[in-house]
Amino acid sequence: QNAVSEAAQKRWTTSDFDVGKPLGRGKFGHVYLAREKRSNHIVALKVLFKTQLQQSQVEHQLRREVEIQSHLRHPNILRLYGYFYDQKRVYLILEYAARGELYKELQKCKYFSERRAATYVASLARALIYCHGKHVIHRDIKPENLLIGAQGELKIADFGWSVHTFNRRRTMCGTLDYLPPEMVESVEHDASVDIWSLGILCYEFLYGVPPFEAREHSETYKRIVQVDLKFPPKPIVSSYAKDLISQMLVKESTQRLALHKLLEHPWIVQNADASGIYRG
Ligand SMILES: CC(C)NC(=O)[C@H]1CCC[C@H]1Nc1nc(Nc2ccc(C(=O)N(C)C3CCN(C)CC3)cc2)ncc1C(F)(F)F
């Protein structure tokens, strides 16, 4: 039985790990560098306090996050190896991303070069094609949810908002009529929400700010629904990049550029490093 499938089934406890330095704070608790004693495998241990989870009523979201992320295997998706809990805490055993948080990197650089942005966008598109192929929508693609691996590759993390869209085929053989409301989950949107978010992310990689940012939420909301997309004169960005972003930030979700078409777009073809690794 290989280590991975063993990891998925094993009953873990904190005594299986040497817990090291804190990597930072997540939404519901701290994240620590840790080493699994038997395999010497370095991981990130995310510790969540049950009281906080209960207060925010996110237990079902956490269960969905664990269920979805533990089954995904892709180089640009952060692995979730397993979880365990004790009296007061839930522990997620996650892949350690050695180069840390992308949003900090973006803050430091202000904005990325077209090659770096295109390399990241292409690797995220490949990860989303993989997710959508498994009827999983991430729904929360943004710099804060992206980490950087040891080779400089991007890792989508935090599937807290992801959903497993209902596989209609499975239910279409039986009639929908007998399914209770909670089963016919109203996934009011489809995978194209991730294409929109990837377009927002591409813009922010190149300009350092998201396209519809405004002082007031009401203002941002208006700019989004009107798709009030403007490209500032600085920093200078190629017209190919603007063309790609304009094809993704389309109000009609069915008209957004499909992810496999994105990978053939001239801006991606000319700028993205095929391995998904930005080497500077
Ligand atoms: C997606 C999600 C929303 N985000 C998170 O969960 C955040 C919340 C806290 C940490 C991060 N979670 C993770 N972080 C890593 N790696 C990592 C993070 C930070 C640094 C870093 O820059 N320092 C330690 C620096 C070193 C220098 N000092 C000065 C500042 C901190 C280096 C490596 N791997 C896996 C995870 C994961 F996701 F598995 F938990």
Image (cartoon, rainbow, N blue to C red):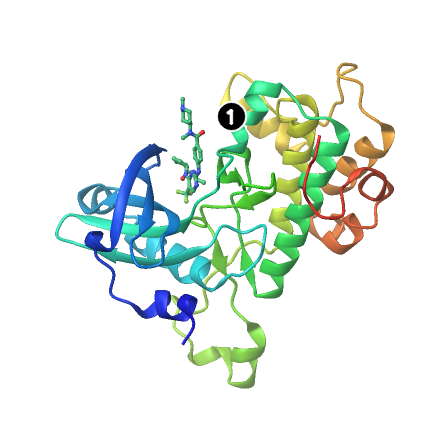
The picture places residue 124, in percent across and down from the top left corner, at 64, 46
Quick check: 272 left or right of 213?
right
The answer to which of 162 and 113 lies nearer the viewer is 113
Q: Quadrant of the C terminus?
A: top right
Q: Residue at x 39, y 50 (%)?
A: 94
Give the x, y percent position of residue 204.
Answer: 64, 28
Quick check: 193 above or below 176? above
Q: How many marks?
A: 1
Q: Quadrant of residue 44?
A: top left
On the image, numbered disc 1 is attached to which residue?
A: 104
Name the quadrant where ligand 1 sits: top left
Kind of element beneath mark 1: helix
Taking 127 as reference, is 228 above or below it? Answer: above
Q: Amino acid at mark 1?
A: Lys
Q: At which x and y percent is residue 260?
A: 76, 55
User: Which residue: 39% across, 58% down?
Assistant: 81
- Indicate left or right for 272 with 181 as reference: right
Residue furthest bottom in the image: 173
User: For this rendering, which residue is in front, 125 or 186?
Assistant: 125
Residue at 51% x, 68% y: name it: 166
Work out whether residue 31 can be spotted: yes
Dot 1 beta carbon under 8 Å from ligand 1 = yes
Q: Report the front residue among 235 and 13.
A: 13
Q: Is residue 28 visible?
A: no
- Please tell me which residue is depicted at 77% across the width and 48% down the height of the picture: 262
Quarter residue 273 falls in: top right
The quadrant of the rendering that contains the N terminus is bottom left
Question: How many residues crowd mark 1 within 10 Å: few (<14), some (14–19), many (20+)?
Answer: few
- Where residue 202 appears, x then y in whole percent? 68, 34
Residue extending farthest to the left is 87
